[in-house]
Amino acid sequence: SKPPVKVTVTGAAGQIGYALLFRIASGQMLGPDTPVTLSLLEITPALKAAEGTAMELDDCAFPLLSGIEITDNATAAFDGTSIALLVGARPRGPGMERGDLLAANGGIFKPQGQAINAGAADDIKVLVVGNPANTNSLIARSHAPDVPADRFSAMMRLDHNRALSQVAKKLGVSVADVTNMTVWGNHSATQYPDLFNARVGGRSVAEQVEQEWLESTLIPTVAKRGAAIIDARGASSAASAANAAIDHIHTWVHGTPEGDWTTAGVVSDGSYGVPEGLMSGFPVTAENGQWKIVQGLDINEFSRGRIDKSVAELVDERDAITGLGLI
Ligand code: NDP
């Protein structure tokens, strides 16, 4: 049988970690033939809680789970790792300015980038989930100069899945019938789900819905879904965020279906006018473990304006972390 793949999860004792680890260990992320070793990275006060989660993982007797390591040391956590899911981040506290938030996250993602650079496996793939995910991913990437830039990514897949689901409901079709969806830009309120290029039954979704619904219902519903879930559940989304992380890595490793694409936050090569180096949501295919930005899509005036607005926010965040000396 295959040798185990080391998977590192940071913030492992948090809510998303709790929803994520059992699915990784059961084979839903890397497939039913790939054993995994889990490495759980936590801050020192959360190590005990991480040990509790590890006890439950043991109690599942997952045949594919070949070992669990728990540590508060980033160098150890990323040593030899092939998949890194960076979930732990500093949440925005009351009265916290954006600069404070970015500085606090710089203190987390810079050393993690350095540890990945120093010790990760040659086939390392990094997904940043912890917010602000795109910019945290940029910070980590900047401190891993020996790792190819395209091995770093940021999670846009939950936004993508939310958009698929809303469109399927609206048109009365199955989510599997909605293809070619893209959520452009930043994982934030400015993100732009593109229904012009999305398709159902071989036709553009935008042709099958009113512009009014697209602008006044779909876009805000997808952008504010996280807040709506907090309001309903009394806690932030965790299972759906974990599910999106599983989907993201599964697609990255196993590829996209012929004729379709997905959304991932990946390093811009300047495509679609997104400044080079930013971590932005793009339409991407995956083949042989590599993302490729889909080229040549038609971007109409409405889409252009929305994409530019979200990308401007990414530029602002990049300028802020540059000013703080974080990259
Ligand atoms: P969660 O597990 O709920 O969330 C973790 C991160 O994921 C947050 O930054 C959160 O952003 C983000 N996130 C991204 N998408 C979503 C989504 N759709 N819904 C909800 N969150 C999303 O946080 P917990 O507080 O439960 O757990 C965090 C853990 O991380 C703690 O155990 C803490 O100790 C640990 N931690 C570990 C670090 C490390 O390993 N070095 C560093 C910092 C923290 P948002 O805040 O915007 O909701």
Image (cartoon, rainbow, N blue to C red):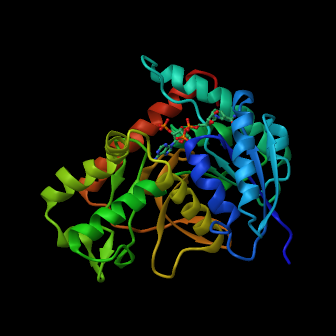
Residue at 34%, 52% in the rendered image: 192
Residue 144 visible somewhere in the drawing = no
Residue 237 visible somewhere in the drawing = yes
Above or below, 271 against 111 in this view is below
Image position, residue 314 (x, y; %)? 46, 39
Image position, residue 157 (x, y; %)? 48, 57
Q: Which quadrant of the figure has residue 181? A: bottom left
Residue at 70%, 52% in the rendered image: 56
Image position, residue 189 (x, y; %)? 35, 41
Ligand 1 resides in the quarter of the picture at top right
Q: Which quadrant of the figure has residue 114? A: top right
State the quadrant of the C terminus.
top right
Above or below, 327 against 76 in this view is above
Q: Number of numbered discs present?
A: 0
Image position, residue 266 (x, y; %)? 56, 53
Above or below, 140 against 62 in this view is above
Specify the farthest residue to the top.
Answer: 95
Left or right: 82, with 128 as reference point: right
Residue at 71%, 43% in the rendered image: 52
State the quadrant of the N terminus.
bottom right
Q: Which quadrant of the figure has residue 66? A: bottom right
